[in-house]
Image (cartoon, rainbow, N blue to C red):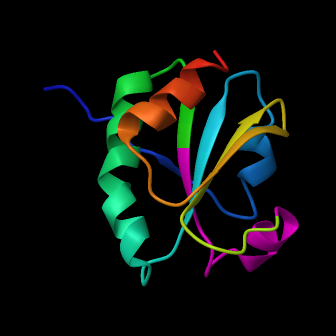
């Protein structure tokens, strides 16, 4: 039985560790009450499965981690940031297709 690769759940404790590595990291800034975030959720799950070990796909609940959301100027959600070596290399605000996100991640590989 294959195990599904799931997005990593980020928090204040692990954010810098996860986003600071060599691999590109897509971070989905979301909240449970956000309708568009719920629409994007399955796409983020699929991306985690598609990219496997080549990129890191992660989610950050802005309500549980307001400091991090504030640090990166997250004003509306969903916002997706792509990090490489701890630096933001791409930003997407709002719901977009899986292909758009996959292209943005692939561009950083």
- Identify which residue is drawn at 77% across, 42% down: 17
Q: Could you say where residue 87 lies in the image, as x and y percent from the top left?
A: 85, 38
Residue 55 appearing in the image: no
> Is the residue 38 above or below the residue 34 in the image?
above
- Identify which residue is drawn at 32% across, 38% down: 46
Report whether 61 appears left or right of 23. left
Q: How many marks?
A: 0
Front one among 28 and 11? 28
Report whether 16 appears left or right of 14. right
Report whether 32 appears left or right of 108. left
> Is the residue 66 above or below the residue 49 in the image?
below
**Span highlighted in magenta in the image:** 58-72
- Identify which residue is drawn at 49% across, 36% down: 101
Farthest residue in the left direction?
A: 1
Residue 71 on the magenta span: yes
> Is the residue 13 above or below the residue 2 in the image?
below
Q: Quadrant of residue 60?
A: bottom right
Residue 90 on the magenta span: no
């Amino acid at each position: 039985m294959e195990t599904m690769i799931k997005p990593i759940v980020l928090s204040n404790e692990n954010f810098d560790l996860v986003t600071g590595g060599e691999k590109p990291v897509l971070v989905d800034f979301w909240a449970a009450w956000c309708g568009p975030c719920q629409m994007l959720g399955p796409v983020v799950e699929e991306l985690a499965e598609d990219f496997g070990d080549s990129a890191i796909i992660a989610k950050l609940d802005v309500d549980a981690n307001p400091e991090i959301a504030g640090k990166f100027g997250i004003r509306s959600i969903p916002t997706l940031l792509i990090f490489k070596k701890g630096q933001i290399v791409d930003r997407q605000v709002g719901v977009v297709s899986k292909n758009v996100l996959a292209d943005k991640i692939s561009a950083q590989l």
